[in-house]
Amino acid sequence: MPSAALPARSRVILLGASNLAIGLPHVLSAARSIIAGPMDVFAAVGRGRSLGTWSSVFGRSIPGMLQSRLWELLVADRAHQFAGETFALLTDVGNDILYNVPPVQIIEWTSELIRRLHSLNAKIILALPPIDRINRLNPATFLLVRTLIYPRRNINFKTAISHANQIFNELQKLADREHVHTVIPSPDWYGIDPVHIRRSLRARAWQNILASWQKSSADSPSANHMLHSFTRLERLRMKFRMPMHWRLFGINIQNQRPHSYSFAGDSTLRLF
């Protein structure tokens, strides 16, 4: 009796800032439970990461998602006619608000990222800013969060809230035009910090955010519905690894290749 064909490898592209960096093990676990067969994950993540320009947090600078080296490898895959499905998650889009980036520029950067993902035939999920939680903010809480997380930024409360609402509305229009699936985060996922998902709810939140991938993949009998559990050491390695190209107090540091890990036995993660 002939053996069943092995499922094709899928490609997963993860683009985000601190929420994605902090929640990466939960995102990988959720994706592995949904997507049939092994995955090759390309991740451009990092605390404070911008969509389209260099950003700096406590002396560590990293390139924007548009400047990430992952695009070079993805274009090479396209040239070799990658045969599997491609899934993409774009999140933390409102991060640039606190860098005083104008909303029109944030939308332009997001549009370009979506264009690149569409060129790879990706099934895209766009996680919108948690606007319901943001609109509940008061000036004192905003000042506290801004001081603790972005101490060198001086955008004021009214401007930040106005820009968040403008970006939220424009992202919805962009997603409709580009036929991109959107997720609006539940305000219940957040505590006093209005932009980072609460630790106790991260696993559930990311499973919810990625649920739309299930329609195309998890109904397959080869999908793995068990959540993969990462060790404490694996979580720490993901948390503190730097991208291929970064700067420390202005000094350029460049690696020849991305940091790469194997997980769940047959899947890989590369950090850009």
Image: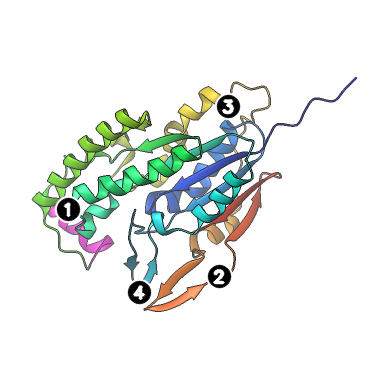
Tell me the residue at 32%/32% (across/down).
175
Direction left: furthest residue: 158
Q: Nearer the viewer, residue 17 or 197?
A: 17
Amino acid type, callout 2: Asn
Please indicate, yes or no, whether residue 64 appears anywhere in the rendered image.
Answer: yes
Q: Earlier in the sequence, mark 4 or mark 2?
A: 4
Query: Comparing marks 4 and 1, which lies closer to the viewer?
Result: 4
Q: Are marks 3 and 1 in contact (CB under 8 Å)?
A: no
Q: CA distance from mark 3 to mark 2?
A: 34 Å
Q: Main secondary structure of the magenta part?
A: helix
Instruction: Report, in whole angstroms, how far the alpha carbon at label 3 lies from the one at label 1.
Output: 40 Å
**Of the numbered discs in the image, which one, if any, rests on residue 62?**
none
Neighbor class of circle 3 (other Cα within 10 Å; few <14, some 14-19, many 20+) is some
Q: Position of residue 111 (x, y in %)?
A: 32, 42
Using the numbered discs, state the Cα–Cα distance from disc 4 to disc 3 in whole angstroms. 41 Å
Q: From the viewer's perspective, is the residue at label 2 or at label 1 nearer?
A: 2
The circle drawn on residue 59 is 4
Nearer-N-terminus badge (3/1):
1
Mark 1 = which residue?
142
- Within the magenta stretch, is there residue 146? yes
Circle nearer the N terminus (2, 1)? 1
Q: x, y percentage for residue 210?
A: 46, 33
